[in-house]
Image: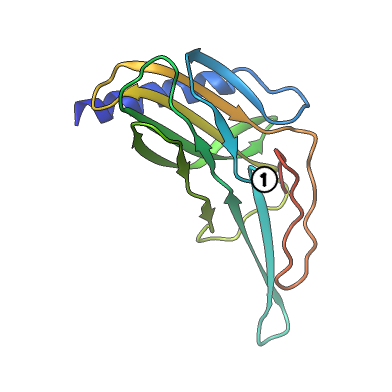
């Protein structure tokens, strides 16, 4: 249990450090690499936004929003040949008052002794309506450790572009367009 607490604390620190350095306007970029992280391959757009409108009985429309992070595949760190634990944090952020703030996050972990680990997609549908004035993005924070220990092998954050912003079409069941490494509104 102490190992898990230390891993979460280390990743939380890395996540906070990452946001102190705003990304440039390029495709997805790796930030704050430390140690010797393994290879990461994105499974699709970092974030896709969905807008849905439902017509109510009184003729008004109810608009709901959700986001999907596509996940990724991660290989072992070259720093160690044995089994490794890989911890991943998906952070859904909003652009509020001129800066990115983490709104909600999800953590996954896995162990590998050879092949890559595929981390799942994550869909978040908030329980309340969301203000469309905010920009949203997903940031991935990854950490590699010797299996069953807190011995750090490597870490990095993957941050999307801030230029691939796009607006959603407001039709029933319409999927918002998303670009590889993009942000959505």
Label 1 residue SS: loop
Which residue does the image show at 60% across and 20% down from the upper left?
31
Rendered image coloring scheme: rainbow
Which residue ends up furthest to the left in the rendered image? Answer: 1
Image spot of residue 78 (x, y percent): 45, 17
- The extreme bottom residue here reads 57
Q: How many marks?
A: 1
Q: Give the quarter of the figure containing the N terminus.
A: top left
From the image, tell me which residue sits under label 1.
Answer: 45
Q: Position of residue 16 (x, y in %)?
A: 50, 23
Badge 1 density bin: few <14, some 14–19, many ≥20, Cα 10 Å? many
Q: Look at 74% across and 22% down and name the residue there.
A: 24
Direction from residue 6 to residue 100 in the image, left or right: right
Instruction: List x then y, in percent, for residue 21.
Output: 63, 17
**Residue 92's x, y, as percent?**
56, 42
Snapshot quadrant of residue 12: top left
> Is 166 rendered above or below residue 139?
below
Comparing 173 with 170, the one in front is 173
- Residue 137 vertical position relative to residue 30 in the rendered view, above or below: below
Q: Quadrant of residue 26?
A: top right
Q: Is residue 32 left or right of residue 23?
A: left
């Amino acid at each position: 249990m102490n190992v898990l607490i230390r891993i979460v604390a280390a990743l939380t620190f890395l996540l906070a450090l990452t946001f102190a350095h705003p990304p440039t306007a390029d495709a997805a970029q790796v930030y704050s690499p430390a140690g010797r992280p393994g290879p990461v391959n994105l499974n699709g757009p970092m974030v896709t936004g969905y807008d849905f409108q439902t017509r109510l009985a009184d003729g008004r429309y109810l608009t709901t929003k959700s986001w999907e992070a596509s996940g990724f595949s991660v290989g072992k760190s070259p720093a160690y040949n044995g089994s490794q634990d890989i911890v991943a944090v998906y952070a859904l952020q909003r652009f509020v008052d001129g800066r990115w703030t983490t709104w909600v996050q999800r953590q996954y972990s896995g162990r590998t002794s050879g092949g890559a680990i595929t981390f799942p997609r994550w869909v978040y549908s908030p329980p309340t309506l969301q203000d469309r004035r905010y920009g949203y993005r997903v940031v991935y924070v990854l950490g590699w450790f010797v299996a069953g220990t807190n011995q750090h092998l490597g870490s990095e954050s993957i941050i999307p572009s801030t230029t691939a912003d796009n607006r959603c079409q407001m039709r029933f069941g319409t999927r918002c367009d998303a670009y590889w490494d993009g942000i959505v509104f």
